[in-house]
Amino acid sequence: MLKTFKSATLTLVVCFGSPAIHADEAVTVAHAWVRATAPGQRVAGAYLEISSAAPSRLVAASSPVAGSVEIHSMRLENGIMTMRQLESLELPAKQTVKLEPGGLHIMLLDLKSPLKPGDKVPLRITLQYADRSKTVVEVQAEVRSAAP
Ligand SMILES: [Cu+2]
């Protein structure tokens, strides 16, 4: 099943597993963007807002432009911005969780080529529900030099 919403943000929702159980448990992803890379930079932060109708966890992300993708948190520790990899990110039901600069983000690592403003980066995000079933959400994130 493939649904396309055409707006400022392009969102593709692909459902795997048990549609009978999760048909009404929609996932919404909005404002997905990736920061453009500086020359020689091989990593980039990806940001978006995500909301799940049912309680779930963001457990994985991937992109064809990156060798690997991690979920990161960022916080100020002793005056230094420190990033930490998260195994998963809790998504309480019907709450919008914001991944944004200076906070939670998706980290694209080992980039295969530079990311220029205006490029579109496909992001594939995997959510896991309490019963361990999974949903994969595909998003086209726009590359930008600054937050929208
Ligand atoms: Cu990071």
Image: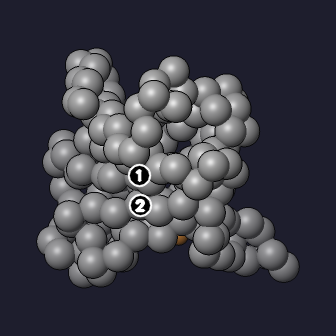
Q: Quadrant of residue 103?
A: bottom right
Density class for disc 1 (Cα within 10 Å; few <14, some 14-19, many ≥20) is some
Q: Are marks 1 and 2 in contact (CB under 8 Å)?
A: yes
9 and 26: which one is in front? 26
Q: Gap between marks 1 and 2, in whole Å?
A: 4 Å
Q: Quadrant of residue 116?
A: bottom left
Q: Residue furthest right?
A: 78
Density class for disc 2 (Cα within 10 Å; few <14, some 14-19, many ≥20) is many
Q: Quadrant of the N terminus?
A: top left
**Residue at numbered disc 1:** 125
Q: Quadrant of the C terminus?
A: top left
Residue at 54 percent across and 37 percent down: it is 50
The answer to whether residue 143 is above or below residue 62 is above
Ligand 1 within 8 angstroms of badge 2 C-beta? no
Residue at 53 percent across and 37 percent down: it is 49
Indicate the position of residue 61 as horizontal and vertical percent values.
41, 60
Number of the label disc, if any, that sits on residue 61: 2
Name the residue type under label 1: Ile
Give the side of residue 107 with respect to residue 65, left or right: right
Indicate the position of residue 35 as horizontal and vertical percent values.
37, 55
39 and 13: which one is in front? 13
Residue at 62 percent across and 63 percent down: it is 88
